[in-house]
Image: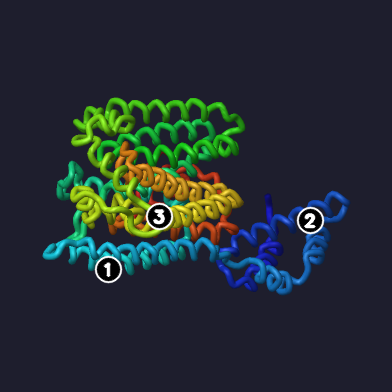
Amino acid sequence: MNVSDAFHRYAEKVCEQIRWKKAHPAVAQEIEDHLTDQKNAYLAAGDSESIAEEKALLQMGDPVSVGAALDQTHKPAPQWGIIGLVLLLFVLGGIIQVLLLKTIPVGNDALATHSAQVLFVFLPLSLATFVGMYFLDFSFFGKHPYVLPLGLLMVDLAAQLFGVSYCGKRWFTLGSFALSPLALSLLFPLAFCGLFYRLRSQGRRGYLISGVLAVVFCLFLSYCHTFSSVVTFVFSAGILMLIASKKKWFDKQRNMFLLLFLLAVVCLIVLLMFYAPFRYRYGWERLYTIFVPSGDPMGSGYLSTQLKTILSHCVLLGEGAALSETQAYLLTDASMLRSDYLLAYLTYHYGWAVSGGLVLLLAVFLGLGFRKALKQKSIFGQMVSLTILCTFTAEILLYIPANLGIWLIAPIALPFLSYGATALHINMALAGVLLSVFRTGEVYRDTQAPLLSESKFIQWNDGKLTISFK
């Protein structure tokens, strides 16, 4: 579509009146398209090109007045309800950490020091991370889809080469701080999302490549991270690919999804039934005790049995009935309670109403989030928001059964509430990106650029590969 210089100047004058600069490209495009359509209508009616152009501009009106009117409607749209929920959950998480201080045994200075770091260092940093991601332009992940996957790969490689081994995993350490490999895996769905979006320009071929990439991601996560990471990724990526197929973002046909969906399910079953049991000696026992935890109450079913016994002593509101010495000891392990079994601790000490209320707040957050995500006008805005919300959903769906004594897969985190410092940072970062989409997604415009077409760092022209370091 050819746009005249007069139309360009008119659009620029309109945009000068709009204070939200991120809206300028979208507004200019809409103005120029409308003027061009009006011009074509006048040309079809028999006017000359100059007359048609002049009439189109006159019909549009004074650019200053038009821009002033658009300035009132084109503003960032912060979702104060969802922001309030995130901050409420974050504050409640901090309060819970204070309550957990009483579970630290007298004389355990190392754990007391770590708890102080959580309260006075990690909480403020994670809040700053949330604010930073909130004001980040989320389109970065679509324009530069390699950055996050390569960054995660480099961190994992550094952890494998220089990290500290703990519980069978390599932890990447920075001085006295350690990055959890389990928590870092929460970023892989978002990393896949950027690549998935850019492959959209290749139609069915891109969809098929995305399926292959998803399998590669799964295998990498199963080796460098944990099986719960694989489940979280498969859930998030699977939902994303299902929606892409239903909305025909890649192709007018949907049948390709069926093959990829079945492939993902088969891969998951294979990993669950064969890979995990052979890699971890307790794999088969864990599969058995999920159905019959009493079959090995002092072995692989021990924790599940004890948690169910503890929960049977809980009441609706207030502290539960007296426990045995062994069960009471489980509720004084601050490091375990802070990360994996926070809901069980809260249920025993404060009642089902308190833990149920927290779960209800998380459900409301997800409900509002999915409702807003499905209303996003841009494909990439929907992709990013749905991916992040599915990641949160997978975390919650893994966490709640583990705290109910249904112990199949170790949980990663309960978003905004359980700690791990790394998990807290990443969940707050993901929440920031999600709310960035909701705030500015209205003016984002999708592109069909292939993965390398806009790269200024690597270019391929006339059979020559050019790498620019400028």
Residue 12 appears in the rendering: yes
Label number found at residue 285: none
Amino acid on which the number 2 mark rests in the picture? Lys
**Nearest the camera: 192 or 11?**
192
Q: Nearer the viewer, residue 422 or 217?
A: 422
Q: Which mark is residue 355?
A: 3
Judging by the rendered image, the residue that carries numbered circle 1 is 121
Q: Amino acid at mark 1?
A: Val
Q: Nearer the viewer, residue 6 or 129?
A: 129
The local secondary structure at tag 3 comes to helix
Which of disc 1 and disc 2 is earlier in sequence? Answer: 2
Q: Provide the residue designation for mark 2.
A: 39
Give 101 or 132, whichever is nearer the viewer: 101
Mark 2, mark 1: which one is toward the viewer?
1
Residue 130 locus on image (x, y percent): 40, 63
Q: Position of residue 37 (x, y in %)?
A: 76, 53
Image x and y of residue 462, in percent: 44, 40
| CA distance separating discs 2 and 1 | 60 Å
